[in-house]
Image: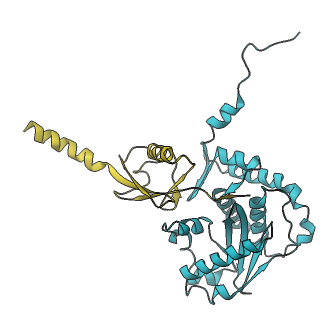
Amino acid sequence: MRFTCALPAPDLRFFVLFFRDDVIFQSGNILINRGDIDDILTNQYFSDNHVDSFAFLLSEKIRIIPKEFQKYLYISPLYRLYKGYKHDYQMFIQHITPDSVRESKLIVQPICFQSHWVLIVGKLKEKVWKLYDSLPNPEHKAICTEVIKQIHEDKAGVFPSDITTWKLQTVRGIPTQSNEYDCEIFVCKYMERAILKKKTDWASLKEWQKYMPKFRAELGYALCLTTKM
Amino acid sequence: MASTSSEQNKKPNEAKSLSLKVKGQDEVEVFYRAKPTTQLSKLMNAYSNRHYFPVAFFFDGHQIRDEDTPESLKMKDGDEIVALIHQTGG
């Protein structure tokens, strides 16, 4: 016997649009809606919201297993955005004090430039900047120098030495993207590896590109787990 | 006397409504008046309808939710809301 449904099939697109604004996670400047989760899972570009939420989840992970990670100072990409539009950006760098610098090993700053994400990591002991770029390009290096200059101007005297004189080295041999939409998830994963105490064997991660959908799903799942009912 | 008493009744209500400034990326400032208990989604929709692009609203470093009110965010008269387009990349 064959059953047929009298009602027309519901248009799922309507439900997707209807629930896009439902808040999944919020903390400070981060606000993740259901639409943001859809973006993570459907290979869309990430916004500063997504990158900051990854950094938040990473800090939670470090709280649970601190032994595996180095102490670092994270600067939200909103710092550059606020500064660029002459808003009050101090809140994004107020945690960078002589004391916090003394206690930390790294400065971590994701940068979005012309729809591309890169990551710079300042090593306070070695006095060197490391640039993680999934699409290596000299133009990206130039913008990093500009950001370092801005941090130096805003935090004069906080660092033990002039951070603009530190060498900016592009990290070679890291896995890179082979499509036009995964740079942000690469930046998030670089960040996760860069702050580990154990040195990363990048050569063994050459196949990272094919795992990016999985990493996106992990981020979406982790954010959904943080939902407070 | 009746008119003065009605004015007196009105004044406290008027004093309650706050003037809030929304500053966009174009550095243009738009002023709105809102009651402390009014949901800020109203203000955000009014601003978004003028600008035709998706904007995120921040107050004191916190992203504003639809159900937030000036009272819940402890906003004061003349406070500034920042309207920004998220940086996206891939």
Q: Is residue A78 above or below residue A23?
A: below
**Which quadrant, please, contains the N terminus of chain A?**
top right
Q: Is residue A88 left or right of residue A33?
A: left
Q: Is residue A28 above or below residue A141?
A: above
Residue A203: which quarter of the image? bottom right
Circle count: 0
State the hue of chain A: cyan
Q: Percent x, y for residue B14?
A: 26, 46
Which residue is at the front of the view, B29 or A203?
Answer: B29
Q: Is residue B79 left or right of residue A23?
A: left
**Which quadrant, please, contains the C terminus of chain A?**
top right
Q: Percent x, y for residue A199?
A: 84, 76
Identity of the residue furthest to the top in this view: A1
Residue found at x 63% / y 84%: A102
Q: Is residue A71 visible?
A: no
Residue A188: which quarter of the image? bottom right
Q: Is residue B1 above or below residue A204?
A: above
Q: Is residue A24 visible?
A: yes
Residue found at x 10% / y 36%: B2
State the hue of chain B: yellow
Q: Percent x, y for residue B33?
A: 35, 48
Which residue is at the front of the view, B26 or A28?
Answer: B26
Q: Percent x, y for residue A173?
A: 88, 73
Identity of the residue furthest to the bottom in this view: A161
Display coloring: by chain
